[in-house]
């Protein structure tokens, strides 16, 4: 079997990498296709997507004849992206030796963090943003944003001191966490929270390439007490 054009009867179905049950079959039979058994086929690795390392690649069509692949999968142009069961991929028809159809698993920084700690890129189960698998009362999202260890019962790297009429709040920021926003808020009653009057600044010399130390300054309040929290959103 020589090179094939996308859209021919043997390989005109959509690539499905993340969902379903794993299975391999000849092109045209039920189940998935295994590129490599034949010179042109589709590699289907159903059910593996969430547990695949960021940057993983999959050869869908290994064209052994000369010339580029003819056509594209429906709605999936060259170098475009698509999402399948929570996994985002880039599809390319000119990789490999120049004329192979390849998928590349794309991930955001927090998905890479999830994979490192939980073996999945998906926001589900123990990797859920709101989960607290180590029982330290700190959500995964906050652990990620402040470079904590989600497998250890540790404390949020933060401190607060009163300096004259101001309150100074210091916290650690994970430099890799570029897909979240860290907001310092204050409250006098634990009910209403505000970021009004809060000024944040990077502490000079604190950037070690992995984390940074930030200081948020705000009025200390007039009733003798003020509560501060670090809110993480994405």
Image: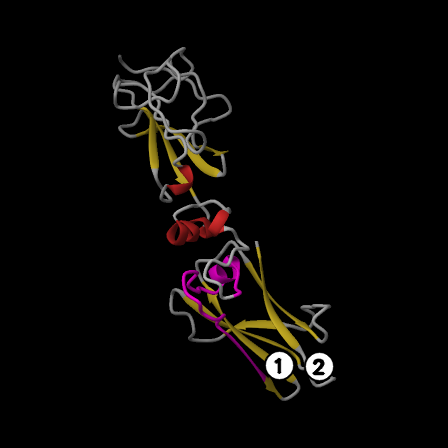
Q: Main secondary structure of the magenta part?
A: loop
Instruction: Where is residue 66? Give x, y as percent.
Output: 26, 18
Please give left or right for residue 74 compared with residue 104 in the image. right
Disc 2 target residue: 221
User: Are the residues tagged 2 and 1 within 8 Å (C-beta)?
Assistant: yes
Residue count near mark 2 (Cα–Cα under 10 Å), binned few <14, some 14–19, many ≥20:
some
Residue count near mark 1 (Cα–Cα under 10 Å), binned few <14, some 14–19, many ≥20:
many
Identify the disc placed on residue 112. none
Viewer-side residue, 133 vs 73:
133
Please give left or right for residue 117 compared with residue 38 in the image. right
Q: Identify the residue shown where x is 70% and y is 68%.
A: 193
Viewer-side residue, 168 vs 47:
47
Q: Looking at the image, which residue sits at the far top? A: 9
Q: Give the magenta part as a residue range.
A: 137-161
Disc 1 target residue: 167
Instruction: Where is residue 158? Give x, y as percent.
Output: 51, 74
């Amino acid at each position: 079997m020589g090179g094939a054009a996308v859209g021919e009867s043997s390989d005109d179905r959509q690539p499905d990498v993340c969902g379903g049950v794993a299975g391999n079959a000849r092109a045209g039979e039920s189940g998935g296709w295994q590129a490599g058994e034949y010179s042109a086929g589709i590699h289907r690795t159903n059910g593996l997507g969430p547990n695949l390392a960021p940057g993983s690649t999959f050869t869908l069509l290994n064209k052994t004849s000369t010339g580029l692949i003819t056509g594209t999968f429906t709605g999936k142009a060259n170098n475009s992206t698509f999402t399948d069961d929570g996994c985002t991929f880039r599809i390319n028809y000119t990789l490999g030796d120049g004329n192979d159809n390849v998928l590349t698993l794309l991930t955001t920084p927090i998905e890479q963090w999830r994979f490192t700690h939980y073996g999945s890129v998906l926001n589900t189960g123990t990797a859920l943003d709101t989960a607290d698998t180590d029982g330290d009362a700190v959500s995964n999202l906050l652990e990620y944003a402040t470079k904590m260890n989600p497998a250890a019962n540790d404390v949020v790297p933060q401190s607060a001191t009163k300096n004259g009429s101001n309150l100074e709040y210091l916290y650690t920021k994970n430099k890799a966490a570029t897909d979240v926003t860290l907001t310092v808020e204050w409250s006098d009653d634990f009910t209403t929270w505000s970021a009004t009057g809060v000024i944040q600044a990077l502490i000079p010399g604190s950037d070690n390439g992995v984390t940074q130390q930030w200081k948020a300054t705000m009025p200390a309040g007039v009733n003798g007490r003020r509560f501060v929290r670090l809110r993480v959103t994405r």
